[in-house]
Image (cartoon, rainbow, N blue to C red):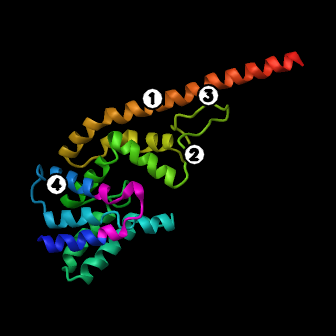
């Protein structure tokens, strides 16, 4: 891939970025993570990998406007149309589309090619650790979701069995288990280094919130009871 081709793809990517948690800097980090992982894998087509990394989140805007849209599926089709419309071979464009369609955290369309597996790991690596916590909080705030939810008894839920969306639910459902889902050995190694940072933050945040509720509710109840007795 020459610089002119890279710039063409990069400029298109930049024009499609609309989500602060999935901005162009996220794309660059995924690309750099992917290149690091690729050094430990054989038979990697770097042109496919670089293109897929640059374009993997171009469907985010479609998903933001319509939550029923899967950004990975939409982005794959958008990438295919862009590439074939700019003279790229249809086979190349299809391989890029597969990488993008399969990079999302779900079971319906797992990555098959080595480039797709590297993209998956590189993208998930940007959700691991402290950076992943920060990005998740930014994104959850963008779509109006709270940090935590309350249980029927009024106590703060840890997110384990929540039905309503929240950061704590996202952590227990996805982030906590994320490091066990990598396809490449290098991806797993990099993720494990970051895992403890996410765990420490989650535990600290849960502890602080619960402490506020437990102590605060007790103080409030005591204050009201004192006022009631003085009436």
Distance in Å between CA atoms under marks 3 and 1: 14 Å
Q: Which mark is residue 213?
A: 3
Q: Which mark is residue 139?
A: none
User: Mark 3 or mark 1, which has the lower sequence index?
Assistant: 1
Q: Any magenta on residue 104?
A: no
**Crowd around label 4: few <14 · some 14–19 · many ≥20 (10 Å):** some
The residue beneath circle 2 is 163
Q: Nearer the viewer, mark 2 or mark 1?
A: 1
The secondary element bearing badge 3 is classed as: helix
Residue at position x 59%, y 40% in the image: 149
Is residue 182 placed above or below 208 in the rendered structure? below
What span is in magenta? 13-27
Viewer-nearest residue: 46 or 95 = 46
The secondary element bearing badge 1 is classed as: helix
Q: Nearer the viewer, mark 2 or mark 3?
A: 3
Q: Residue 73: which quarter of the image? A: bottom left
- Left or right, residue 6 beside residue 26: left
Q: Residue 163: which quarter of the image? A: top right
The residue beneath circle 4 is 35
The C terminus lies in which quarter of the figure?
top right
Is residue 39 placed above or below 48 in the rendered structure? above
């Amino acid at each position: 891939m020459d610089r002119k081709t890279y710039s063409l793809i990069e400029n298109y990517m930049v024009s499609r970025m609309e989500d602060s948690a999935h901005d162009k800097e996220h794309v660059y980090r995924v690309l750099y993570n992917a290149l690091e992982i690729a050094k430990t894998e054989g038979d990697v087509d770097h042109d496919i990998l670089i293109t897929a990394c640059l374009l993997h989140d171009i469907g985010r805007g479609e998903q933001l406007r319509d939550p029923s849209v899967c950004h990975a599926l939409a982005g794959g089709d958008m990438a295919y149309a862009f590439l074939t419309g700019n003279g790229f071979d249809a086979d190349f464009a299809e391989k890029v589309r597969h990488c993008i369609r399969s990079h999302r955290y779900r079971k319906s369309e797992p990555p098959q090619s080595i480039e797709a597996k590297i993209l998956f790991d590189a993208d998930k690596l940007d959700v691991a650790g402290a950076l992943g916590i920060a990005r998740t909080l930014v994104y959850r705030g963008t779509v109006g979701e709270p940090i935590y939810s309350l249980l029927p008894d009024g106590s703060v839920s840890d997110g384990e069995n929540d039905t309503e969306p929240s950061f704590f639910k996202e952590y227990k459902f996805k982030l906590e288990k994320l490091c066990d889902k990598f396809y490449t050995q290098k991806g797993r190694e990099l993720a494990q280094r970051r895992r403890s940072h996410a765990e420490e933050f989650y535990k600290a945040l849960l502890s602080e919130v619960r402490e506020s509720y437990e102590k605060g509710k007790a103080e409030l109840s005591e204050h009201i009871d004192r006022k009631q007795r003085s009436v």
